Image (spheres, rainbow, N blue to C red):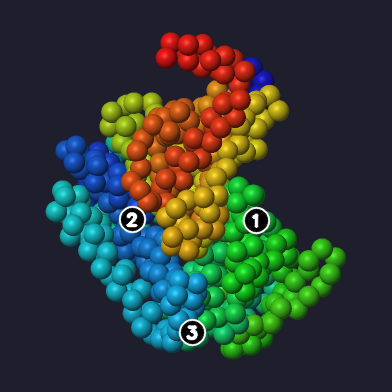
């Protein structure tokens, strides 16, 4: 940018006329949308004694509760139990093919979601001192939002409307029945030959789950599968899925689809070759797009595009009074809600200029084995100007993993030459749980030495975190200088 010139501001739409009979509400914080990040902001702000208004047109909790992370975990639990029955022979237990009642599985998912739903009930938020408005929140100017017959004027706004499933532009798709990440959880029929379209974590997780629930599954990924994850760990996971009979085909171009109920065809191009993939059902799990429709962002002077609302490192939009969190801001999903809400609260209420550090947010794929990463990737940390160490330790060297027949996978840690932890990844049992220790280490700027100075319970899989850290010093034993020091000290007895 040339000196003296500034970034052009987004064009503002003319203010919308309002009905003088609308109820006027003044607030300190107005949260638009019931996504987890927005709910966390509302709860925290109310706890500080602020006047908070929360606007949501559907159900509080949004996608993560009703057809996202929580529903997927409940469905996966059923698939994992079924797989345990198939693979029990090495432990001396007769394996058998489980009988799967998909209606009962569906009821389990519904029960799990409904069991958590009271935590997101409007009455709970009202009890916390939050004014809850049911409706669509829409900006009419930089400081005012209308919702139904209410007009809210606030010092600060937080947009947390989340995302909606993305439907790729595929010829013929709108003409045939297909499942999405919203509708698949209510399906009670067996998906005999399931074609999953997608390349992200949702696509891979659902592919394994339905494979374990008795479907034959094939994944068609437009680019690289799990392209936000470490390539080394991803390759290992894809191979493990292949051993379960789940084919993941990368870099496919879907030309068109056709067919009808129970028989569908997907015409694809891989490289220069044309193929036809046949199945009984199609599941579109192509990620999410930000829910920005009808928010009146132009009237508020908020810049946005197809990737979501533009925010800076402090999650503030081009309107200084408005923050955006979660999928609507092209930010990570529900797992970052608490982190993002803390940044907003510190900035909006305490005027502390904190910024989001994306390297502190773990990225997890909840398959078996699982895959998790936090911190810099090997490519980022291994910039030509930097020198790094890459540490690895296999699950087969962990006593608990061996005892439980789960000795598949490994941990990988990136450090500077001085031992500062830069990133860590795990592919193996419980990866999403084990990565927490490395997320803590990164948040505190710890050296790898700190990861050798705690005492794990024995036998636990978490010991692998200490085992890989200790390996950093394995090469130090042969250091000539260190050996001379030890020889010298030996003279004193």
Instruction: State the image coordinates of residue 386 (x, y, percent, origin top left).
Output: 65, 25
**Displayed quadrant of residue 112:** bottom left
Of residues 217 and 261, the one nearer the viewer is: 217
- N-terminal label among 2 and 1: 2
Q: Upstream in the sequence, badge 2 or badge 3? A: 2
Q: Specify whether 51 is left or right of 62.
A: left
| Residue 445 % position (x, y) | 44, 28
- Is residue 270 among what the camera can see? yes
Which residue has dot 3 on it?
Answer: 97
Residue at (64%, 82%) from the top-left corner? Answer: 279
Q: Where on the picture, by quarter, is residue 123?
A: bottom left
Q: Is residue 292 visible to us here?
A: no
Q: Which residue position holds label 2?
A: 34
Q: Which of pointers 1 and 3 indicates the residue nearer the eye?
A: 3
Question: Does dot 2 land on a helix, a strand or a loop?
Answer: loop
Residue behind mark 1: 235
Which callout, 2 or 3, points to the residue nearer the camera? Answer: 3
Classify mark 3: residues with Cα within 10 Å, few (<14), some (14-19) or many (20+). Answer: few
Q: Depth check: 470 or 116 in front?
A: 470
What separation in Å lies between label 2 and label 1 (alpha carbons)?
Answer: 36 Å
Label 1 neighbourhood size at 10 Å, few (<14), some (14-19), many (20+)?
few
In this view, 334 is above or below 349: below
| Residue depicted at x 16% and y 38% | 49
Q: Is residue 371 above or below residue 167?
A: above
Q: Nearer the viewer, mark 2 or mark 1?
A: 1
Name above or below for residue 453 compared with residue 64.
Answer: above
């Amino acid at each position: 940018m040339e000196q003296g010139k500034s970034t052009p501001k987004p064009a503002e739409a003319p203010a919308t006329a309002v009905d003088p009979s609308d109820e006027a509400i003044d607030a300190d914080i107005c949260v638009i949308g019931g996504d987890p990040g927005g709910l966390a902001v509302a709860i925290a702000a109310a706890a500080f004694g602020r006047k908070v208004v929360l606007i949501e047109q559907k159900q509080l909790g949004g996608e993560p509760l009703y057809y996202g992370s929580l529903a997927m975990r409940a469905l996966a639990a059923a698939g994992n139990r079924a797989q345990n029955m198939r693979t029990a022979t090495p432990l001396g237990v007769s394996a058998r093919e489980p009988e799967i009642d998909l209606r009962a599985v569906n009821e389990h998912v519904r029960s799990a979601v409904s069991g958590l739903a009271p935590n997101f009930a409007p009455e709970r938020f009202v009890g916390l001192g939050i004014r809850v408005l049911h409706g669509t929140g829409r900006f009419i100017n930089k400081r005012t939002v209308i919702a139904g017959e209410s007009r809210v004027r606030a010092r600060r706004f937080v947009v947390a409307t989340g995302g909606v499933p993305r439907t790729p532009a595929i010829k013929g798709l709108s003409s045939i029945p297909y499942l999405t990440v919203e509708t698949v959880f209510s399906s009670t029929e067996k998906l005999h030959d399931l074609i999953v379209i997608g390349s992200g974590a949702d696509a891979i997780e659902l592919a394994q789950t339905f494979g374990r629930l008795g479907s034959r599954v094939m994944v068609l990924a437009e680019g690289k599968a799990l392209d936000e994850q470490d390539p080394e760990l991803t390759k290992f996971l894809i191979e493990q899925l292949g051993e379960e009979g789940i084919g993941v085909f990368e870099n496919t171009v879907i030309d068109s689809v056709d067919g009808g109920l129970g028989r569908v065809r997907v015409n694809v191009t891989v490289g220069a070759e044309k193929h036809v993939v046949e199945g009984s059902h199609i599941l579109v799990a192509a990620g999410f797009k930000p829910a920005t429709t009808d928010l009146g962002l132009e009237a508020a002077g908020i810049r946005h595009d197809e990737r979501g609302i533009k925010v800076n490192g402090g999650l503030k939009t081009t309107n200084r009074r408005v923050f955006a969190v979660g999928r609507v801001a092209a930010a990570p999903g529900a797992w970052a809600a608490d982190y993002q809400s803390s940044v907003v609260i510190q900035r909006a209420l305490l005027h502390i200029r904190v910024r989001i550090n994306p390297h502190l947010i773990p990225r997890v794929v909840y398959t078996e084995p699982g895959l998790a990463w936090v911190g810099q990737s090997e490519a980022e940390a291994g910039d030509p100007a930097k020198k790094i160490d890459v540490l690895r330790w296999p699950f087969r060297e962990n006593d608990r993993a061996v005892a439980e027949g789960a000795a598949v996978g490994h941990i990988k840690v990136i450090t500077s030459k001085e031992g500062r932890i830069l990133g860590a990844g795990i592919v193996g049992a419980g990866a999403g749980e084990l990565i927490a220790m490395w997320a803590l280490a990164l948040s505190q700027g710890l050296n790898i030495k700190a990861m050798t100075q705690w005492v794990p319970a024995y036998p636990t899989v978490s010991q692998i975190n200490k085992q890989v850290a200790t390996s950093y010093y394995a090469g130090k034993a042969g250091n000539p200088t260190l050996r001379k020091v030890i020889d010298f000290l030996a003279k004193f007895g």
